[in-house]
């Protein structure tokens, strides 16, 4: 990124060569990203984040199709960038169906089909869940949406760079991604839109991004995102194998060595680096703090909601009780993690769980046969 | 590499070395998600809080009133859309001016198309907003007034304090937004003294990074988010925070304001040197907003010259200027700002904007003077036709 701060510092909208140099860089990177996603360059729109891409896709289609209908289909386990946008639209008079998921976190095609109405203007279903890692049958849902003539958006923020993401294979009309999830910079994302067709604009102003997304382009971050995506894709298979091996090591260790624990998410259709457990009788937050003291960074639920005390909407949707949901922790691995990291975690985790359970009234209550505490 | 004489700092600026180093360093070492509860997250959150505090100090406001965005355009959109949506019950009347940046104008046009009544206030021939006309336009159902602090094409400083002082005294007062994208870093910007409820800033206009901006929101302002999601920044603007960009913006702000007086003196001299030369050599050239402009921006029309031709001839000599604003330059339409000022149609095409930053030196101006003296006579249409005869 560095040369693009100091050497190519122009405003891509300027007509002189310093501006044109910047414009050329953007065009080149746009084409590279398009190729990786199986898209055309004019179908790639740069945004400031995955959240913006989700907001734009959903609000844009909703605003542009108000006359056609006001029904939107999504799921109960979407990221908040989708969920809260849909809730906002509900306050504006739109109707939203939040599809349920099974105990593994999967959406059923039948449920999608049943939810479709004459006035349905959009289906938005995430590619893989950020908390429990479950991968959805996007290509099949896309097929269905196509046959019904309904625009289909997927939030691929968690999957891009991790597993293959090709807009043609996935049968999607719109797709959101975020660079910082694949070792790119924070503050940059993409909205893919088939044939460049999005609904109304979200950010109005200058003529950037084919008159669809105003704002001076963030060239260093665009280059950073493109480079990170190329690296991620080049090494995807190798990384997937490595990360999956480490992840499976954690899963089998935890399930074999710690009692009263549950693996959340799908056993096979899940992100390679995701392991989400519910440790009964303890608070996920306390577990996190003790892991942190040992230099291990994990999370309870998603980072975005970590400030809140409400249990994860995803864990509740797969049928966990509030109590069990509260005791959940997500370990998300990337190719930068090593066996050493995993061994360190394996060494630390049982002791921490034991310590926390020893001070847990719930756990002690259980031992006395009193589950009501 | 050929030497560059970059005189288009109104479009964007080269970031400070220190800013680039900081952005790189934080990207490498403090990569946590500021929403995460663990140490890496807290480290990022601390950097963001420090940036908020630094900006609050510069603006004379509270850190809790600082919100980070992806740039000036998003700040303007968030301020305008957010306050319109939150105050739907109050009314459907909006006020802005004819000379705003497209990131303001286009948002108002969008709401106009949605059925909002919008007054676009005119300016006088110097490019200054007509305060009386604006104040007369305010009604009980006016939701928002939006005025830029400094015009990006002419540099004309707008009477934002005068307008804010009047709005303050009204009973059913509308929200007041100031687009300070072109002004911040070039003059003291104190939203409270302007009476502003909302104020927009963009990082890359003062040697900070692109892709990051600020929206000041006065405590208690009735405004709704545009970006929904994880509830970042108190729910006002969802999206993972760009820690390196935010820190880079704050550092650039501190640096530019610690040097404000010295830079101001330097740029004032560069301006005077250029204007004296233009007045001496090109008697019929028109300098726009000469007496209300910030020193940093010079807008000149040369009769019978095509601005774009002049721009490319200057470019061939390594001198970079612009015609109008960068953001509309791909749109090819004539400047809405100069038109609003009543500039004669034959002058509209012949206008260039020269905009300075602290990185400019007298040498740049000498080079520009030399180039103008050489190019203008050659490309002036009248002269060319004489030669052809």
Image: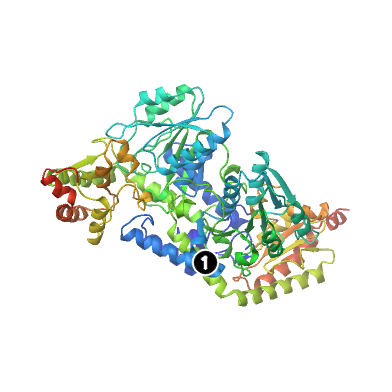
Badge 1 is on which residue? B56
Position of residue A103 in the picture relative to residue B303 (left or right): left
Disc tally is 1
User: Is residue A158 shown to the viewer in this render?
Assistant: yes
Name the residue: 52% across, 61% down.
Answer: B65
Position of residue B6 in the picture relative to residue A228 (left or right): right
Is A156 drawn above or below residue A307 in the view shown?
A: above
Q: Nearer the viewer, residue B91 or A53?
A: B91
The quarter of the rendered structure image containing the N terminus of chain A is bottom left
Residue A206, given in percent of the width and then of the height, sits at 62, 49
User: Is residue B155 shown to the viewer in this render?
Assistant: no
Position of residue B362 in the picture relative to residue B250 (left or right): right
Q: SS class of the residue under badge 1? A: helix
Is B192 drawn above or below residue A162 in the view shown?
A: below
Residue B79, given in percent of the width and then of the height, sits at 58, 52
Q: Nearer the viewer, residue B276 or A75?
A: A75
Name the residue: 14% across, 54% down.
Answer: A358
């Amino acid at each position: 990124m560095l040369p693009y701060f100091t050497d190519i510092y122009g405003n891509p909208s300027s007509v002189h060569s310093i501006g044109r140099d910047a414009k050329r860089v953007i065009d080149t990177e746009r084409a590279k990203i398009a190729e990786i996603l199986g898209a055309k360059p004019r179908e790639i729109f740069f945004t400031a984040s995955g959240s913006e891409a989700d907001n734009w896709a959903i609000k844009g289609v909703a605003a542009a199709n108000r006359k056609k209908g006001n029904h939107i289909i999504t799921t109960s386990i979407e990221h908040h960038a989708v969920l809260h946008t849909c809730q906002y639209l509900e306050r504006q008079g739109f109707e939203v169906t939040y599809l349920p998921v099974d105990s593994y976190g999967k959406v059923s095609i039948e449920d999608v089909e049943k939810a479709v109405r004459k006035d349905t203007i959009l289906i938005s279903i995430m590619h893989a869940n950020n908390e429990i890692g479950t991968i959805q049958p996007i290509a099949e849902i896309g097929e269905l949406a196509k046959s019904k003539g309904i625009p289909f958006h997927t939030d691929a923020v968690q999957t891009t760079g991790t597993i293959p993401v090709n807009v043609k294979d996935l049968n999607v009309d719109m797709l959101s991604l975020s660079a910082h999830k694949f070792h790119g910079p924070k503050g940059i994302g993409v909205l893919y839109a088939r044939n460049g067709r999005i609904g109304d604009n979200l950010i109005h102003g200058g003529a950037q991004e084919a008159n669809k997304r105003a704002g001076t382009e963030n060239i260093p971050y665009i280059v950073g995102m493109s480079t990170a995506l190329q690296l991620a894709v080049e090494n995807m298979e190798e990384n997937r194998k490595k990360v999956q091996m480490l992840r499976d090591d954690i899963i089998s260790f935890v399930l074999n060595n710690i009692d009263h624990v549950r693996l959340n998410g799908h056993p096979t259709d899940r992100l390679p680096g995701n392991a989400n457990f519910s440790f009964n009788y303890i608070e996920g937050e306390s577990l996190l703090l003790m892991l942190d003291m040992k230099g291990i960074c994990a999370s309870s639920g998603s980072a975005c909601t970590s400030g809140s005390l409400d249990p994860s909407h995803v864990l509740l949707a797969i049928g966990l009780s509030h109590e069990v949901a509260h005791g959940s922790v997500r370990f998300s691995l990337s190719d930068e993690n090593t066996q050493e990291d995993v061994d360190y975690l394996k060494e630390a985790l049982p002791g921490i769980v034991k310590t926390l359970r020893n001070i847990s009234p719930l756990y002690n209550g259980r031992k006395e046969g009193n589950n009501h505490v | 590499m050929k030497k560059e004489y970059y005189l288009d700092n109104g479009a964007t600026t080269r970031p400070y070395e220190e800013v680039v180093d900081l952005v790189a360093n934080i990207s490498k070492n403090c990569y946590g998600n500021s929403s995460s509860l663990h140490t890496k997250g807290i480290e990022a959150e601390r950097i963001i809080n420090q940036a908020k505090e630094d900006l609050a100090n510069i603006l004379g406001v509270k850190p809790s009133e600082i919100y980070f965005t992806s740039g000036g355009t998003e700040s303007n959109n968030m301020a305008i859309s957010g306050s319109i949506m939150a105050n739907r019950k109050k009314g459907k009347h909006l006020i802005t001016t004819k000379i705003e940046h497209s990131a303001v104008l286009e948002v108002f046009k969008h709401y106009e198309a949605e059925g909002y009544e919008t007054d676009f206030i005119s300016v006088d021939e110097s490019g200054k907003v007509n305060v009386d006309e604006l104040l007369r336009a305010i009604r009980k159902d006016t939701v928002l007034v939006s005025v830029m602090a400094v015009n990006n094409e002419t540099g004309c400083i707008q009477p934002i304090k005068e307008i804010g002082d009047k709005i303050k005294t009204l009973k059913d007062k509308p929200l007041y937004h100031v687009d300070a994208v072109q002004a911040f870093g070039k003059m003291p910007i104190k939203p409270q003294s302007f009476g502003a409820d909302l104020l927009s800033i963009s990082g890359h206009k003062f040697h900070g990074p692109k892709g990051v901006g600020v929206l000041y929101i006065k405590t208690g302002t009735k405004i709704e988010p545009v970006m929904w999601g994880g509830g970042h920044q108190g729910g006002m603007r969802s999206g993972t925070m760009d820690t390196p960009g935010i820190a880079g913006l704050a550092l650039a702000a501190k640096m530019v304001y610690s040097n404000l007086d010295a830079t101001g003196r330097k740029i004032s001299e560069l301006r005077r040197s250029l204007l004296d030369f233009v007045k001496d050599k090109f008697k019929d050239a028109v300098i726009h907003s000469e007496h209300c402009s910030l020193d940093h921006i010079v807008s000149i029309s040369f009769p019978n010259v095509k601005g774009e031709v002049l721009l490319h001839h200057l470019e061939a000599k390594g001198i970079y200027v612009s015609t109008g604003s960068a953001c509309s330059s791909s749109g090819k339409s004539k400047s809405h700002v100069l038109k609003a000022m009543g500039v004669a149609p034959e002058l509209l095409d012949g206008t260039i904007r020269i905009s300075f930053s602290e990185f400019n030196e007298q040498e740049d101006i000498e080079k520009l003077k030399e180039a103008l003296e050489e190019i203008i006579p050659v490309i002036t249409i009248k002269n060319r036709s004489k030669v052809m005869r």
